[in-house]
Amino acid sequence: MTVPAWWRPLCRWQFVLLLAIYSYFGLTTASGPHIPQYNDKLMHFLGYGVAGWSITVALPGWPVWQRLLVLVAYSTGIEVIQHFLPPRTFSLGDILANIGGALLGLGSAELARRLAPNLSRTLLER
């Protein structure tokens, strides 16, 4: 199956959109009804699991460690900026939950790449 020329740019744009959404929710100072309150660390973990898949689809040729580094740098950057946005605060726990989720997302994407060759050719082609 041949991947259309528009596929890879679309994959990259979905990752950019994901980061824009995460940036909005991570940096907004209003905690109104548009931001549901759930278990904070679970939401961080699951969100970065999705981000791990998202960056793998967007940048499949990059080694896992580089994709992880991008997600860790982004996560840390958001937390540092939150320190300067009252009532937001810096949280090492959030960063650790993000890293755990990113590892889960990246690891499961790599596992899928190895176990499902058809998926690998269409979604995760290097």
Image (cartoon, grey):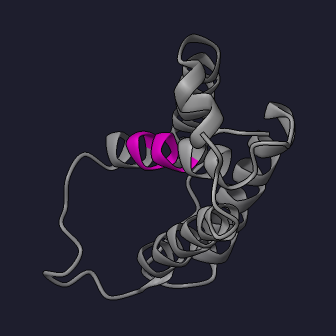
At x 62%, y 62%, the residue is 7
Q: Nearer the viewer, residue 119 or 66?
A: 119
- Kindly tell me whether residue 100 is visible in this rendering: no
Is residue 50 magenta-colored? yes
Q: Nearer the viewer, residue 36 or 110?
A: 110
Horizontal side of 90 relative to 21 (left or right) equals: right
Image-quadrant location for residue 80: bottom right
**Secondary structure, magenta segment, majority class:** helix
Q: Considering only vertical position in the picture, is 103 above or below 6?
A: above
Furthest residue toward front? 1
In which quadrant is the C terminus drawn?
Answer: top right
Which residue is found at the position 85% from the left and 43% from the top? 62
Question: x, y percentage for residue 119?
Answer: 53, 30
Location of residue 120 by image quarter = top right
Q: Magenta region: which residues? A: 45-51
Q: Report if residue 74 lies within the magenta region.
A: no
- Residue at image x 66%, y 43%? 56
**Residue 62 seen in this snapshot:** yes
Image height check: is 37 above or below 17?
A: above
Q: Is residue 29 above or below residue 124?
A: below
Q: Picture coordinates of residue 76 (x, y %)?
A: 70, 57
Residue depicted at 71% across the width and 39% down the height: 125
**In the current view of this chain or complex, which residue is farthest to the top?**
115
